[in-house]
Image (cartoon, coloured by chain):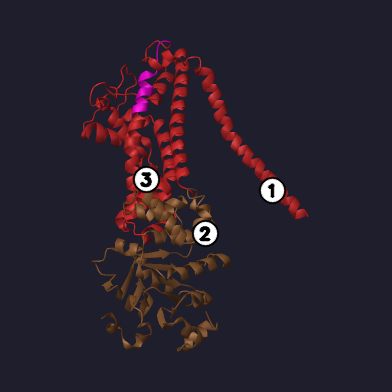
Chain colours: A red, B brown
Amino acid sequence: MRKSALNKWTDRSFFAVGLIATLTGLGVLLILLTDVLTDGSGRLSWQFLTSYPSRRPEEAGILSAWAGTAWIMALTGVIAFPLGIMAGIHLEEYGKKNWFTGLIEINIANLAGVPSIIYGLLGLGLFVRTLALGRSVIAGAATLALLILPIIILSTREALRSIPFSIREASYALGSTKWQTIRYQVLPAAMPGILTGTILAMSRAIGETAPLITIGALTYVAFLPASPVSAEFPFINLNGLSDAFTVLPIQIFNWVSRPQKGFFANAAAGIIVLLTITFLMNAVAIWLRHRYQKKIRW
Amino acid sequence: MVKAQIPEKDKVVKPMEAAFRVTRLSAYYGAKEALKDVTLDIPKRSVTAIIGPSGCGKSTFIRCFNRMNDLVREFRIEGEILYNGTSIYSDRVDIIELRREIGMVFQRPNPFPKSVFENVAYGLRIQGISRKSALKETVEESLKKAALWDEVKDRLHGSALSLSGGQQQRLCIARAIAVNPKVILFDEPCSALDPIASAKIEDLITELKKDYTVVIVTHNMQQAARVSEFTGFFMLGELVEFDVTKKIFTAPSNKLTEDYITGRFG
């Protein structure tokens, strides 16, 4: 009797502690959002989204920054996602166990924890100088891709490892090649896990400022990278890759450091835009994950 | 010609053609010897049961036939297994072709996390067959042969994992049948199933031997006695006795076999 009363009490107090922990996180986020929304929502307008930066806060806009972020994130994803998955598949499925692959594994795990500014320096040395890409969109995207590559590789391996061996056995026993087994059985089943890792990685990349400042992203950009679609054949235009750029976090940081009150409101509005893009990006990834989860029928 | 090559001591299988001829087979996991000098013939279009206590090498033995052991690091064999006259461990053998001809059903039902239809169709899809009508036809035919069609025909596109354990195992059999094999290997197919589901699988195996060569590993002696025509008794990696099932269970020639089937150990 007393024992069960004690159990009940333990249960309840654990529930309370859990609830408080959950509410703390949510509460802080809520305060942050309310604060940003009250400061910045008045400044959000079509004009704000479609204007270049200016020294007068009421005329300044965020066009070059959000366009830059969109460019950088799209390219980062395009570079890092296939590379990360292929590296993960190789290490997990094809890599032989020896000291060399062991070394690679340890290094990848360590790379996931390296401060982002180090990647900035690497990008500056490798992409901007050695490969002479300049302070361009492609140099920025390549740098961020390197930054998130370890996270994608690790989550790919983790997801592949979680697929039971019996599934592979079943596939081999039917006369599948190794590639068919991976392509048609293992990878689709691992896809939701891989996408979850990618969401986390991309969310990290979108907020990064330090590595992009290091490679020379500008704080004042009054033009856009050349549009990726053109009216004439072949309808795709890659000139934008070599243009200079800025991104939202840099623009926000720049505004926050100004003394005028008007720029403060601009920064808050910029944060709202940044958050919106992050949420949209995650929503797409979650939608993709759901589609995969529906296709595999556990 | 073939008959003439069968040695005197294997006279028991003489009336039937051998699907597999195992000669002095030894198998190793690293330094550990799992099979010692096994020689026997597996007759065509019949059920051969492999029995023996846990760890006697019976799973290792059956997995040599479709080279499933290749997936295990540090596994190697000595000796020879002939399948229709070709050595299956020779370099010239296409392992993909071999596994298409020699299907396998595993200890635990292991359907793919896909629909019932896609499970059965997978073996065909990887061979490049994608015509909807051809797939449909083979899927239906295979499910019928596996005595599962009536239970799943209305939920072909539902998840295979929502089926019961016994249904899942029959689905795995249908999946193996779909690629039109000559041999089906069963590695303790009923060990994860209840008695009713096991009985259905046994009935099915009896049915399958008309068209296929069946080799079944089982730790259930009654099952071996019920379904098989030939039985091999393994112990500690050695083949103790191989004979007609009836003889093994009524008048075994080896004392160890007698002790095992009468339940004195194992």
- Chain letter behind tag 3: A
Q: Which residue is mark 2?
A: B167
x 27%, y 63%: residue: B94
- Whether residue A287 is situated above or below residue B138 in the rendered picture: above
Q: Nearer the viewer, residue A234 or A162?
A: A234
Vertical arrangement, residue A98 with respect to residue A285, above or below: below
| Secondary element at tag 2 | helix
Tell me if A279 is positioned left or right of A52 in this view: right
Residue segment shown in magenta: A58-71
List the residue tagged with mark 3: A153
- Disc 3 is placed on an element classified as helix
Write down the residue under mark 1: A10
- Residue A90 painted magenta: no
Is A19 on the left or on the right of B211, as rendered?
Answer: right
> Relative to the observer, which residue lies in front, B227 or B263?
B227
Q: Which is more toward the observer, A121 or B212?
A: B212
> Residue at the location (44% across, 75% down)?
B49
Q: Are marks 3 and 2 in contact (CB under 8 Å)?
A: no
